[in-house]
Amino acid sequence: MPSFVILSKLAPDALRQPSDLKKLAETVSAKIKKECPTVRWKESFATLGQFDVVDIVEADSPVDAERAAMIIRADGHADTETLFATPWKEFLNEL
């Protein structure tokens, strides 16, 4: 199953206070589970730097991953960048 990395940067007005992030994350997660049933979350990371959140997901197709990213953009009040990812060992085996 293809893997994708979704990089998200929250809009400055997305939260009134940091504790609001928990509710926002729950809302976005529930909508993605409902509307993108083929997207499987592997891992999420809070990060410092250019992006606030890094999500690693698997999806049946790029369209499914794109839909999840659009939900993050719209409901999560974030800018996103989505990358196709190949596991390192798999990549090396193809060389």
Image (tube, rainbow, N blue to C red):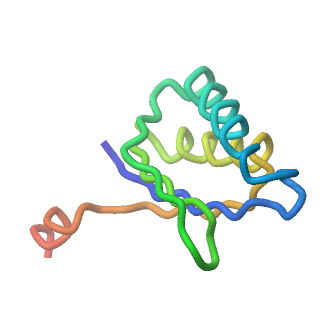
Report x, y in % for residue 45: 47, 57
Identify whether 67 is placed above or below 4: above
Give the x, y percent position of residue 1: 30, 42
Callout count: 0
> For the point 43% across and 40% down, which residue is it?
41
Q: Residue furthest left?
A: 93
Foreground of the two, 37 or 11: 11
Residue for point 24% across, 61% down: 87
Q: In which quarter of the image is residue 31?
A: top right
> Looking at the picture, does residue 71 appear above or below residue 77?
above
Above or below — where is 37 with respect to 74?
Answer: above
Quadrant where the C terminus sits is bottom left
User: Could you say where residue 47 lies in the image, as x and y percent from the top left?
Assistant: 54, 68
Q: Where is residue 82 in the image (x, y as percent from the top left)?
A: 56, 60
Q: Is residue 77 left or right of residue 59?
A: right
Q: In which quarter of the image is residue 30?
A: top right
Viewer-closest of 47 and 84:
47
Residue at 39%, 48% in the rendered image = 43
**Quadrant of the rendered structure where residue 28 is?**
top right
| Residue farthest top in this picture | 34
